[in-house]
Image: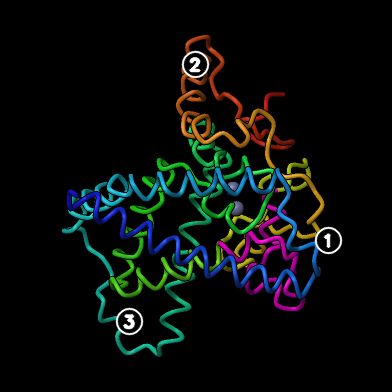
Amino acid sequence: MSEYAHSVMMLLSEKAQFILCFFAVITVLAWFKAGRDALDWNDSLRRSGAVNLVIVAFNMAALVLPLAATAFLLNLLKDMPHVPGQVWQDAPWLVRAFMALLIFDLANYTMHRLSHFNAWLWPMHAVHHSDTELHFLSANRAHILEWVLLVPTGAIVAYFCGLSINDVVFLGLLREAHQYYVHSNLDWSHGPLRYVIAGPRFHRWHHVDRDDAYNKNFALFFPFIDLAFGTYYMPGPAKTLATGFVGSPGDNALKLLMFPFREWVRLVRELGAGRVGSIPPREQPGSALRPD
Ligand SMILES: [Zn+2]
Ligand SMILES: [Zn+2]
């Protein structure tokens, strides 16, 4: 077996262990909250879960793409002035962790919001929004090209802010665990802490396919970022509300993989026809991208 194939197998095995651990934790939590109903994986849920596993396996096999893009860009920018690492050295661990999370979340907020408002970025991010059965495995539904965009962005922001490689690993692991949690169907709001740390209800509203919910709740960890920028929205329980978007390829891994390319071809054709500023499929009232 080649070295690369061996590395992919190792990554897949670690990912599988991570998913199994989370499956156990989420199932126990859901069982405490909703009883036996929480253990019912209907056909639609099983189909969605299987597609999400196929997508994450493909992305792990193609991990060389975001990693190569990250290495290339970091090498290109290595001589640019940046915050020296020593700035963080004397800070207490908790302050350092909070600052790292905040920087990471602000960068993510920017990219995530752009992905919803830019017609060319939306087709990549739309793959994540295609899941109509939101559950913890939905965290894995992301197009590999979105990884190519987000992994270098996170690494570059961390580099320019003087964060160490340990900070980056910490952020990556925490992000992964937290993403599984916020996609789970626990419908927890976090009560008085709802502005402090994002929970499943906060993120489910981001996925709800309804006019009033579009383009809300972009933050990963800290809902107060959405509060500060006017995009916070959590009017009540969202567990029974539909997710997904019109024009989604649904639970078809191959169509999801091809979706951005198909949409880009459509956008180029529309540009050619003079219809500049084409609309992302998930259009919404008030968007600069929606035609009058
Ligand atoms: Zn989104
Ligand atoms: Zn999500």
| Point 75% across, 71% down: residue | 31
Dot 2 amino acid type: Leu
- Return the mark for residue 236: 1
Sequence order check: which comes first, mark 3 or mark 1?
3
Dot 3 amino acid type: Trp
Toward the front, the furthest residue is: 1
Residue 18 place in picture, x, y as percent: 47, 66
Q: For mark 2, what is the residue?
A: 271
Q: Is residue 167 left or right of residue 137?
A: left
Sequence order check: which comes first, mark 2 or mark 1?
1
Q: For mark 3, what is the residue?
A: 88
Q: Find numbered disc 3 in the image and state the secondary structure of the residue it sits on.
A: helix
How much space separates mark 2 and mark 3, taking CA atoms?
47 Å
- Mark 2 nearby-residue class (10 Å; few <14, some 14–19, many ≥20): few
Q: Find numbered disc 1 in the image and state the secondary structure of the residue it sits on.
A: loop
Tally of marks: 3
Dot 1 amino acid type: Gly
Q: Is residue 268 left or right of residue 63?
A: right
Q: Which residues are magenta?
A: 180-207
